[in-house]
Image (cartoon, rainbow, N blue to C red):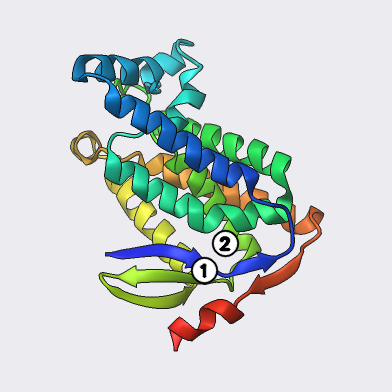
Amino acid sequence: MIFPYGDDQVKGGHFPLFSYAFIAVNLAVFLFEATLPLPLREEFLMKYAAIPSHILRGEDLHTLFTSMFLHGGWMHLIGNMLFLWVFGDNIEALIGNFRFLIFYLLGGLLAHAAHIYFNATSTIPTVGASGAISAVMGAYLLLFPRSRIRVLFFIFPFGIPAFLFLFVWIFQQLLNGKASLHVATAESSGVAWWAHIGGFAFGVLAGIWFRLTVRRPSPPEATYYRRPYR
């Protein structure tokens, strides 16, 4: 398995307030969730998770937001927060705090829309920040394609260009999303592949807009990170 754990950082720009705040909120909500007895935990998840068939009936619309801060387990939480930690700060440093807040939430909503479109009759609760984080990754592809992503392959660290890492990632999502159109696969995978794809597509479009309208700070600072790549 390949895990990202860092990247080149832009020099200057805005402090990534909301990137870190989202990580803190997701962690706090999960810790609260973990303290609940199992019946209450299941009730809590059912109340605040997004269920596609309910959304299409106009019910529980608040869950389109609340579900972005819920996770199904430690590995689900850690994986999502790791990706937000790596990719979120550069985007927020570039586009600013308020823009990032709106962009992140819109990314989550568009990710929900893609998932619901392909799972309109589903009664399976959807939780997780991965749709919004996929939007962040899509924007990163446009804004920092040559940034170096630090990854671990099992225990071996090395660097990989962001555009290559993200192309491979979205290709995997597309393959799995296509496979999930078969009912048996969709029911058994437990992953909202189309939320990832929809969020990423929105992020790419937003990245184009940001490139045209946002003044860029200094390029990513790679001096500190280059030594491990040699």
Quarter of the image where the C terminus is located: bottom left
- Give the side of residue 199 with respect to residue 191, left or right: right
Q: Is 190 or 113 nearer to us in this picture?
A: 190
Q: Residues within 10 Å of mark 1 (few under 14, many from 20)?
A: many
Marks 1/2: CA distance?
7 Å
Q: Are marks 1 and 2 in contact (CB under 8 Å)?
A: yes
State the image quarter where residue 77 is shown: top left
Image location of residue 4, percent across then percent down: 41, 63
- Give the answer, above or below, for where 118 lies relative to 89: above
Q: Which mark is residue 141?
A: 2
Looking at the rendering, which quadrant does residue 228 occupy? Answer: bottom left
* Above or below 50: residue 18: below
The residue nearer to you, when weighing 72 against 181, is 72
Residue lying at 45% horizontally and 53% vertically, measured from the top left: 83
Q: Is residue 161 above or below residue 141?
A: below
User: Does label 1 or label 2 sit earlier along the sequence?
Assistant: 2
Return the residue at label 1: 162
The residue type indicated by label 1 comes to: Ala
* Disc 2, SS: helix
- Residue 104 in percent (x, y) is at 59, 40
Q: Secondary structure at mark 1?
A: helix
Give the residue type at disc 2. Answer: Leu
Residue under the point 25% across and 70% down:
154
Q: Is residue 154 visible?
A: yes
Quarter holding the N terminus? Answer: bottom left
Name the outermost residue toward the bottom. 230
Numbered mark located on residue 96 in the image: none
**Along the horizontal axis of the image, is 96 left or right of 121?**
right
Assess disc 2: are there few (<14), some (14-19) or many (≥20) residues with their C-alpha within 10 Å of its C-alpha: many
x and y, in percent, of residue 27 in the image: 41, 37
Residue drawn at x 50%, y 16% as measured from the top left: 61
